Amino acid sequence: MKKTVLITGASSGFGLMLANKLHREGYTVIGTSRQPEKYARNVPFKMLRLDIDDDNSIRSFTQELFTHIRHLDVLINNAGYMVTGIAEETPVEVGRQQFETNFWGTVKVTNALLPYFRKQKSGQIITVSSIVGLIGPPNLSYYSASKHAVEGYFKALRFELNDFNIKVSMVEPVWFKTKLAENSVLSTGSNITDYDNYRKQVRAATQKGIDGAEAPDAVICTISKIIETKEPKFSNPVGKMTGMILFLQNYAPKMFEGSILKSVKTAA
């Protein structure tokens, strides 16, 4: 029997593509959106309302979820967004909201569903992180920090859930062609003139990465494989350059730092 899968943020990007694929393959798929009525008619799977920033929304969603299903096999934490901008120029409130969604929202949804997984003594939690949760590129300080936080949280949680047969995995893509960049929030803080030239260069480098992004198929395929793996790996970087990026960072840090600095200076 195919599994029942819950995917947060299933109205676009990786979430929508994965939900459609799993539905075609016979899985029972539940997707979430802050405005499910906008998408319900255009998707073949059930779409429920969930705002991961809102505690009341999480509570009501959890109650409604189990009126539609009796058993949940997989939670895929996919909802989130990206803040871009020079760190010093980014207002703290903008950074705090990035954490409210990407970190605390993900944590609160996970915690709301853990009692059900523990009761059934089985389950799987897959969280869509990012390669920036493993490295720290410029112009993405708060986004990178939020993903580092998510990585650390689930890295510890996996041990606590081991006795309940609940598997925990992270998926860490590089740039892929989704609406993540299109829907990103550009820091609206005041510009510091000392950064004027660097800001131009780093934005050009970021845009170059977006323009050269891979098609998202590899990410969708990776998540599908994790769902069907009995003993999945915790960390799953995805993308043509992930191996080289992580190798350089871990074993040739000077070369890694030099490549980041060079990519910024030569982009503009």
Image (cartoon, grey):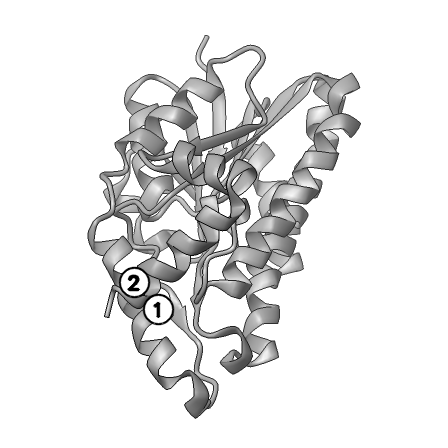
Residue farthest top in this picture: 1
The x and y percentages for residue 126 are 54, 32
Q: Secondary structure at mark 2?
A: helix
The x and y percentages for residue 260 are 40, 56
Query: How busy is the neighbourhood of tag 1: few (under 14 within 10 Å), some, or many (20 plus)?
Result: many
Label ID, residue 50: none
> Which residue occupies 46% across, 89% down?
192
Label ID, residue 202: 1
Q: Is residue 112 visible?
A: no
Closest to the observer, 201 or 44? 201
> Which residue occupies 37% across, 85% down?
196
Query: How busy is the neighbourhood of tag 2: few (under 14 within 10 Å), some, or many (20 plus)?
Result: many
Quarter residue 202 falls in: bottom left
Residue 97 appears left or right of 16 = right
Give the mark count: 2
Residue 246 appears left or right of 117 = left
The x and y percentages for residue 154 are 66, 38
What amino acid type should be assigned to the residue bearing mark 2?
Ala
Q: Secondary structure at mark 1?
A: helix
Instruction: Give the residue at mark 2.
Output: 205
What amino acid type should be assigned to the residue bearing mark 1?
Val
Q: Give the Cα distance between marks 1 and 2.
A: 5 Å
Up the image or down, 28 lies above or below 91; here it is above
Up the image or down, 135 lies above or below 114; here it is below
Name the image quarter holding the C terminus: bottom left
> Which residue occupies 43% across, 73% down?
85
Q: Is residue 203 visible?
A: yes
Up the image or down, 247 lies above or below 27; here it is below
> Which residue occupies 56% across, 51% down?
147
- Callout 1 touching callout 2 (CB < 8 Å): yes
Quarter residue 82 falls in: bottom left
The x and y percentages for residue 168 are 62, 28
